[in-house]
Image (cartoon, grey):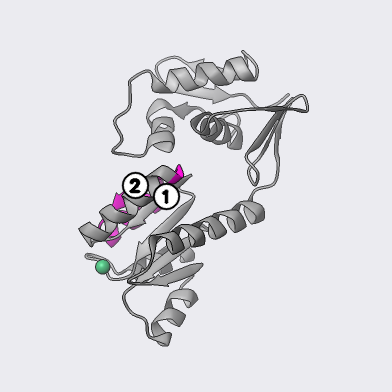
Amino acid sequence: MRILLVEDDVALGEGIRVALKPEGYTVDWLQDGVSALHALTHESFDLAVLDLGLPRMEGLAVLKALRSAHNPIPVLVLTARDSTSDRIAGLDAGADDYLVKPFDVDELQARMRALLRRSFQRAQPLIVHGDISLDPASHQVCYQGQPVVLQRKEYLLLHQLLCQPGKVHTRDKLVQVLYGWNEEVESNALDVHIHHLRKKLHPDLIRTVRGVGYIVDKAA
Ligand code: CA
């Protein structure tokens, strides 16, 4: 799961980032509204945690811009404003949920899990590709009807590739999906995951496009 955290309070942002990491999320963190809108428009995230009071562009404006562009990403709003009218404004602008500061990190995690569960059940039916099936709701992957155990990053990688068969995914983009922007990544990490996927599923499933990246061909 790749999360975009948008919070200009450095201590709070760092606290959230640290708390979410062991949960297995890939967390990217931005501190202003303009960068957040740009990232959400051009990259794919599973959920955004969005503060409302942000420099350069208010969180509410970011949210409105996203929704008017029909971007369906689940958004959990963080707000220091706890008046009813502010909450309603947030929900009206397209927030899926909100938390009023100060909040407990455990509660943030629980709300995030609920939103992610809902969005996966709603938006993502079973993906079937030849002999492979991948269930985004349960993260279950089967090959010829038999469950295959994948590591988290192997699963993320497979999901990314199977969602757009016939499309070449650049190495940079795939590394971002797996690790976010700031994580130190061994240069061959991606190749190792690809190697494991080929071994666990099928050697010809993922094709290398030399100098560019990887592709899963459209199922015949
Ligand atoms: Ca703020």
**Picture quadrant of residue 89:** bottom left
Is residue 50 found left or right of 168 in the rendered image? left
Is residue 125 found left or right of 105 in the rendered image? right
Q: Is residue 32 magenta?
A: yes
The answer to whether the residue labelled 1 contacts the one labelled 2, judged by CB atoms less than 8 Å apart, is yes
Q: Which amino acid does the dot numbered 2 rest on?
A: Asp
Magenta span: 23-44
Residue 107 position in % (x across, y down) = 45, 64
Is residue 203 found left or right of 172 in the rendered image? right
State the residue lying farthest toward the right.
Answer: 145
Residue 76 position in % (x across, y down) = 44, 64
Residue 175 position in % (x across, y down) = 40, 31
Residue at image mark 1: 3
Q: Is residue 92 above or below residue 185?
A: below
Crowd band around label 2 with a 10 angstrom C-alpha radius: few (<14), some (14–19), many (20+)? many
Q: Quadrant of the C terminus?
A: top right
**Picture quadrant of residue 219:** top right
Q: CA distance from mark 1 to mark 2?
A: 6 Å
Residue at image mark 2: 28
Q: Is residue 128 above or below residue 32?
A: above
Q: Is residue 81 magenta?
A: no
Q: Is residue 33 above or below residue 82?
A: above
Which residue occupies 33% across, 72% down? 101
Q: Which amino acid does the dot numbered 1 rest on?
A: Ile
